[in-house]
Amino acid sequence: MKLLIKKLNLSFYILLIYSFVIYLLPHNMTMGLYTPNLLGWSLVVTFFLAILLYIVLLFLDLKEKNKRKELLKRSLILILFLVACTFYWCYKAIKSGNLNS
């Protein structure tokens, strides 16, 4: 069981890093004419897989009560990822003139 949790945990972090790197790419690389292109769809898929893995790991950590430290670390990293993406999105929107501030 511990090996499974370690592999899932590693997969979660890899997917989160991959999503963040693709999110930092310019939008003309991730967007097609009306829908996301291949990189855009990979961003969507990897982000939702990371959220799904987070939920699975959350249940596994709650089942094993001694993994509270790992749960806190994973939750903080996910929140930091979401905050960083939000700030980057706002920065890009202000820079392009789509968001008034």
Image (cartoon, grey):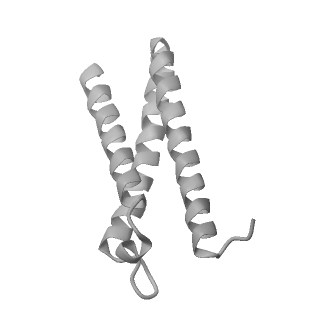
Which residue in the rendered view is the most extreme toward the top?
A: 66
Compared across the picture, whether 56 is left or right of 9 comes to: right
Above or below, comparing residue 66 to residue 43 in the picture: above
The residue at 53%/53% (across/down) is: 85
Looking at the picture, how far across and down is residue 54, in whole percent? 45, 39
Q: Nearer the viewer, residue 101 or 59?
A: 101
Which residue in the rendered view is the most extreme toward the bottom?
A: 33
Above or below, comparing residue 84 to residue 91 in the picture: above
Q: How many discs mark residues in the rendered view?
A: 0
User: Which quadrant is the N terminus positioned in?
Assistant: top left
Above or below, comparing residue 24 to residue 67 in the picture: below
Looking at the picture, how far across and down is residue 7, in whole percent? 26, 32
Q: Nearer the viewer, residue 34 or 83?
A: 83
User: Which quadrant is the C terminus positioned in?
Assistant: bottom right
Quarter holding residue 93: bottom right
Quarter holding residue 37: bottom left
Looking at the picture, how far across and down is residue 79, in whole percent? 56, 39
Above or below, comparing residue 91 to residue 76 in the picture: below
The residue at 36%/40% (across/down) is: 12
Which residue in the rendered view is the most extreme toward the front?
A: 95
The residue at 55%/65% (across/down) is: 92
Compared across the picture, whether 5 is left or right of 87 comes to: left
